[in-house]
Image: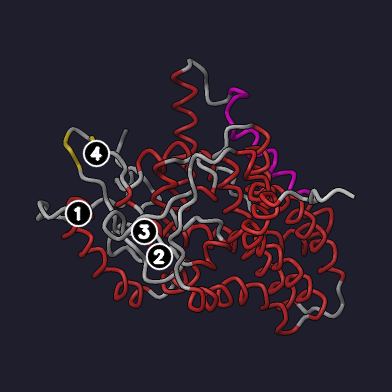
Amino acid sequence: MSDTPLIPADRVRRLSAALPFWMSLLLLPALWLGAALGGLWVLLPPLMAWYLFSALDAALGLNTDNADPSIEESQLFWYRLVTLVWVPAQAASLFALLWYVPRAGHLDTAEAIGVFFGMGVLSGTIGINYAHELMHQRNAWERRLGDLLLAMVLYSHFRSEHLLVHHRYVGTPRDPVTARYNEGFHRFYPRVLRQSLTSAFKAERDMLARRGLPWTHRRNPFWVYWTLQGGCLLAAAALGGWAGLGLFLVQAGVAIWQLELVNYIEHYGLTRKHLGDGKYEHVKPRHSWNAAYTASNWLLINLQRHSDHHYKPDRRFPLLQNYSEEEAPQLPYGYPLMTMAAMIPPLWRRVMNPRVRAWRRTFYPEIEDWRPYNRHATPLPR
């Protein structure tokens, strides 16, 4: 009888290392438990996503270990798989709930809305975050899966805005998603909803124009965006009627709110130095807020290692590197707790404004007048 193990030890090691990032899938049974039982059970998914992972952060603390960034992609199978599995899992839950909830006699209107509020927390906190990971990859089928996740929340233009605008102009007035110093979330949110859509469309239009093509050309990805989003709306109406359509819009709105809360905290008050003639310094680790909290990085697949993401945008999430306080600014808590603080502007300013001022003194002591960096609430002309 052979002594050779059935599963090689290195494969078991890689699987066990990847398993914590699969914890997001536990939120889907919680969603269905709320739909089945009603009452306060419908609050279980947001309570788990926001408070459970914040409690785990407090218990587990920081993880500053860095994986070898030269690891071959073939060794990342179990990490990649969770982002791929989530796409059909989210779609199945969303569209099954659109059929089930309008017909569930034990759920009143408030409970039905509560179920889809929880669905929106998941499709925003996890789904859009996984779409973000997928749309940064080089192979087209992963990017298409990302498009499907974004279509389910009616925010498909996020791909164009993020890849063509945000990564290029982060930390400058040309980036709608960079929150200005002292700009509360309640001012940031309506501004970014408007500006990110227009800036995404203009970026795609200008790219086509450089090739001598009109914006109506079939290569404009907005045709794909509109088609996928229209298909989702039709499916929602077909499965749940007007009630289903309304509930679909509830979860989409919650998901977008969750995304933009994260966008708000990722670069709040951080600016790249203006070099004159409309030019800015290159993006550096100092231009993103980071958090090394263990559990929330499991939930958000290392999104909180945001500086390295801007340094290597196509780097797979398990390989993202952590930066020290000397290299990049650190948030006092993980994203779940920080996004809750962002909803209370006085609390947010009390926590974050001193940190922004300390960041300015540390990295840009030569800049005495910061008013030009705070002045613009709209993108500058390109």
Category of crowding for the residue at label 2, using alpha-carbon neighbours closer than 10 angstroms: few (below 14), some (14–19), many (at least 20): many
Residue for badge 2: 185
Please report the bounds of the magenta region as a residue range: 217-234
Label whose residue precedes the other's in the sequence (3 or 1):
3
Crowd class of label 4 (few under 14; some 14 to 19; many from 20; radius 10 Å) = some
Question: Cα distance, mark 3 to mark 4?
Answer: 19 Å
Determine the residue positioned at 51% across, 47% down: 319
Residue 289 image label: 3
Screen quadrant of the C terminus: top left
Q: Which residue is mark 1?
A: 363
Question: From this viewpoint, which residue is outermost toward the bottom?
Answer: 40
Q: Quadrant of residue 123?
A: bottom right
Question: Element under label 3?
Answer: loop
Q: Secondary structure at mark 1?
A: helix
* Distance CA(mark 2)–CA(mark 1): 25 Å
192 drawn magenta? no
Residue furthest out toward the top: 212
Q: CA distance from mark 3 to mark 1?
A: 14 Å
The vertical placement of 276 against 238, above or below, is above
Q: Amino acid at mark 1?
A: Phe
Disc 2 to disc 4, C-alpha distance: 25 Å
Going from the N terminus, do you reach mark 2 or mark 1 first? 2
Residue 315 placed where, x, y %? Answer: 50, 42
